[in-house]
Amino acid sequence: MRLMDAQKPFIIAGPCSVESREQLNAVVSALAQMPQVSMVRCGVWKPRTRPGGFEGLGEKALRWISDLTQKLRAEGLRPLPFACEVATPQHVELVMRYGLSAVWIGARTTANPFMVQELTEAIRGTGLTVLVKNAPSPDVRLWMGAIERCRQVGLSEVIAVHRGFDVLKNGGYRNHPLWEVPIELRRVMPDISIVTDPSHIAGRRELLQEVAQWAMDLGFDGLMLEVHPHPDEALTDGRQQITPEGLKELLGKLVLRQTDGGMADKELRLMRGQIDRIDDQLLRLLASRLEVSGEIARVKAQSNLAVFQPKRWESLLQQRLSTAEELHLEPEFVKGIFEKIHAESVRVQQERLSRAEKDVEKSE
Ligand code: PEP
Ligand code: MN
């Protein structure tokens, strides 16, 4: 059975890093008593962006994990499956030696297909479940590529982890969620489970609930959350970690959604029909608008005017934004749409212009 089939939402919780035997035992004993938690996460190799800080306890931490699993069994508690990050084939070998059930490929590793290839070959045939975090850059193909490499070597359970993206305007997040990227992953790889990691997206605990709820609202399959017995004393990622109590509260407040319609199906079908008709109208309007742009190109060509007229663009945008305000539409959203429309209009006009010039050359 795949680990992911255990329950939905699939909750993975645990410390950013294993720091001591006491810390590990305290957090895992608490998690083992929470029926919603299906897997424990804990980092044991933690190279930081710059050297010199806490870098993880490596094999020693793996030994504690293996001892703890036996202790939980002996106490009749659930022996939760453990996952840790691996970045080299040697890490995979050690994880196997200490009996962990799953590994994750970290964001920085996913960005490097050489390393992903080496790792997947080392994982081949081990039976480990593999979680693939998205690369820091918002390129769904890198994420897909790493998942495909896992599949190519026949790994039986591969799960995508959405941990947000490193972008210039981070919108107050540590890593912007850019929900459109996991939504695109779902479209192109519908059979891959997606687990959202609110901790690395949010970067601070106040935002976790909201991000976790968004993931549920979008119908994603689970959450990965960092949990520490004393978050403010954590050696890594302290601002975003919560206590086991905090996790209980967060999960308790989470509103779970159905992924298929049930009773709402009929009503939804009607509304989706409306949306389809509106989208059809939008597309037809866009086509008419671009036709007029083409005509404008002809007039500009006759008067030898530049295609791009900055003053006109500025006043058009301001007018659209003021209409948007009246209609209670988000200004950034409307601005983004008109930037796209304007860019396409400029492209169409340039194309017409160069075509018209070629025709003149030919006739000369
Ligand atoms: C982590 O999960 O602790 C971690 C380092 O994550 P990421 O690779 O997403 O930065
Ligand atoms: Mn972390």
Image: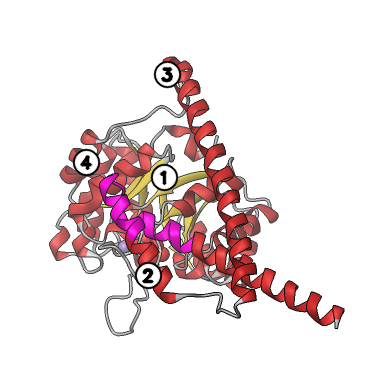
Q: CA distance from mark 1 to mark 3?
A: 36 Å
Label at residue 314: 2
- Answer whether residue 102 is visible to the viewer in this image: no
Is residue 248 shown left or right of residue 329?
Answer: left
Choose mark 3 or mark 4, whichever is in front: 3
Q: Quadrant of ligand 2?
A: bottom left
Choose mark 4 or mark 2, whichever is in front: 2
Q: Earlier in the sequence, mark 4 or mark 1?
A: 1
Choose mark 3 or mark 2, whichever is in front: 2
Q: Farthest residue in the right direction?
A: 363
Choose mark 1 or mark 3, whichever is in front: 3
- Residue 339 among magenta residues: yes
Local packing at callout 3 (Cα closer than 10 Å; few below 14, some 14-19, many 20+) is few
Label at residue 295: none
Image quadrant where residue 192 sits: top right
Q: Earlier in the sequence, mark 4 or mark 2?
A: 4
Q: Earlier in the sequence, mark 2 or mark 1?
A: 1
Is mark 4 in CB contact (under 8 Å) with mark 1? no
Choose mark 2 or mark 1, whichever is in front: 2
**In the foreground, 293 or 130:** 293
Label at residue 264: 3
| Residue identified by numbered label 1 | 81
